[in-house]
Image (cartoon, helix red, strand yellow):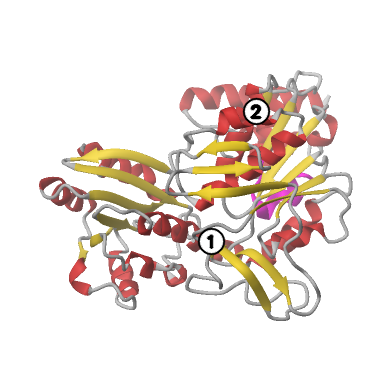
Amino acid sequence: MKKFLAILVCKFGRAVGKLVGKGSSMPGKFALKICPDILARVRLPQHVIAVTGSNGKTSTVEMIAAILRAGGKTVVYNEEGSNQIEGVTTTVLTHASLTGAVRADVLLIESDERYAAQSFRYFHPTEFVITNLYRDQLTRNGHPEWVYDAILPAIHPETELILNADDPLSSCFARGHEKVKWFGLDRCPSDTDAPTGAYRDGAYCPVCRAPMEYDYVHYNHIGAFRCTKCGHRKPATDYTATALDLERGTLTIDGSVTIQLAFRSIYNVYNVLAAYAACRECGVASDTAAGVINNYILKNGRMQKFTLGAHRGMLLTSKHENSIAYDTNLRYIRAAQDPCTVLVIVDAVSRKYFTSETSWLWDIDFNQLNAPQVQRVILSGRYCNDLAERFSFTDIPWEKVTVQPDIPAAAAELKAAGSEDLYVVTCFSDRDKILSQVVKEA
């Protein structure tokens, strides 16, 4: 009886929530109060794919869903991104019959990394994609190794892990686990010989703490790592990206599948690889996966083109308080050839905890904007003075830097003058405001 009531309440709450534009987690919260073990009582599809990690969850899940649907499978997933246990419960029960059978071929779950153990307490994924573990929202998550310990209880012995072979920390989930598939990127022209960025989380082995060495590095501490003591190293990959050419926007997977990249970012390559690997493990043909991925435009709006006066603009949205997300967007700008202006906006910090803590700005490698094509940098938003202090410790000539707290004023100034390319760098929680205050000027 409790099972039936929990499903009914969840469905009703979800229907009401849609009418008011909310309700992605609250219905699940009520269902769990009625029947705390409701997720153990439902009948799940043959494939339950989970995706977690610091960066790339939403983008990877979105691509997986599109590929699976192109392969003829019915897919249910938490499209609104509500990825804690309440949101997962809402997704599952909304798409279940009143008797508790989920009506889909695949249940696809984006899971918050800290709460994965709660979400998968009563059932386990058949395939579990872990994209990476980076510094992310330090006020909430602490160090990545703490997040690793939080995810570990969510891993079931029967689950097939799909892991990033180039990440020293998340690759440790394979230790003692029998069912593992690896995805990774071979050496490419943009690689460096040593880790980059403002800090080095990959300096020491996460297994034995001995110094780590690298044959090549794709970005920050992601690459072909090897421990000098215990042998922890990049494993051989099952799904491999080669022949990456960011200038042309192409790469090859498994030596035969050519992919055209809509966004020429090395970070996007890993999302593509993770999605490709997960779908191939679920039986989708390689040509079907490639057909969807080719020039795939993400719906989540993390890269968005616009015009502002005579400027061609690109909105680059980084995950909130996540330095590597910022670094990859700054690397995208640095690789551009044409003259440009960069508008950096930080208008909100720690939206959940309200700490106004900005130490994470010092983990971002803003020095990448010290490039000849970057003609000027405008710092805007509520925390523009914190940005200005951070930029005073870079090598960027100060005459290139302008501080304009008011975002609409900065947009109006840009619209009135110049025709160079424009890049707007901000965090995800500021995106809607930026769209309304900058992009609407077009």
Quarter location, residue 68: top right
Asked which secondary structure carries label 2, the reply is helix
The residue to which callout 2 is attached is 287
Please check the rendered image and state whether residue 257 is part of the magenta-colored stretch, yes or no.
no
- Using residue 318 as the reference point, say whether residue 376 is left or right of it: left
Rendered view: 20 above or below 346: above
Residue 137 image label: 1
Q: Residues within 10 Å of mark 1 (few under 14, many from 20)?
A: some
Give the vertical position of 31 relative to 411 (above or below). Answer: above
| Above or below, comparing residue 75 to residue 81 in the picture | above
Q: Nearer the viewer, residue 37 or 135?
A: 135
The image position of residue 43, as x and y in percent, is 83, 27
- Image quarter where the C terminus lies is top left
In the rendered structure, the answer to whether residue 46 lies left or right of residue 411 reads right
Camera sees residue 25 = no
Q: Which quadrant of the figure has residue 391?
A: bottom left
For the residue pair 317 and 210, the one nearer the viewer reads as 210
At 77% from the left edge and 18% from the top edge, which residue is drawn? Answer: 98
Q: Position of residue 212 (x, y in %)?
A: 68, 76
**Magenta segment:** 110-120
- Circle 1 sits in a helix, a strand or a loop, which is it? loop
- Residue lying at 67% horizontally and 25% vertically, measured from the top left: 75
Q: Which mark is residue 300?
A: none
The amino acid type, in three-letter code, at marker 2 is Asp
Let me know if residue 210 appears in the view. yes
Nearer the observer, 255 or 40: 255
Q: Main secondary structure of the magenta part?
A: helix
Q: Residues within 10 Å of mark 2 (few under 14, many from 20)?
A: few
The three-letter amino acid code for the residue at tag 1 is Gln
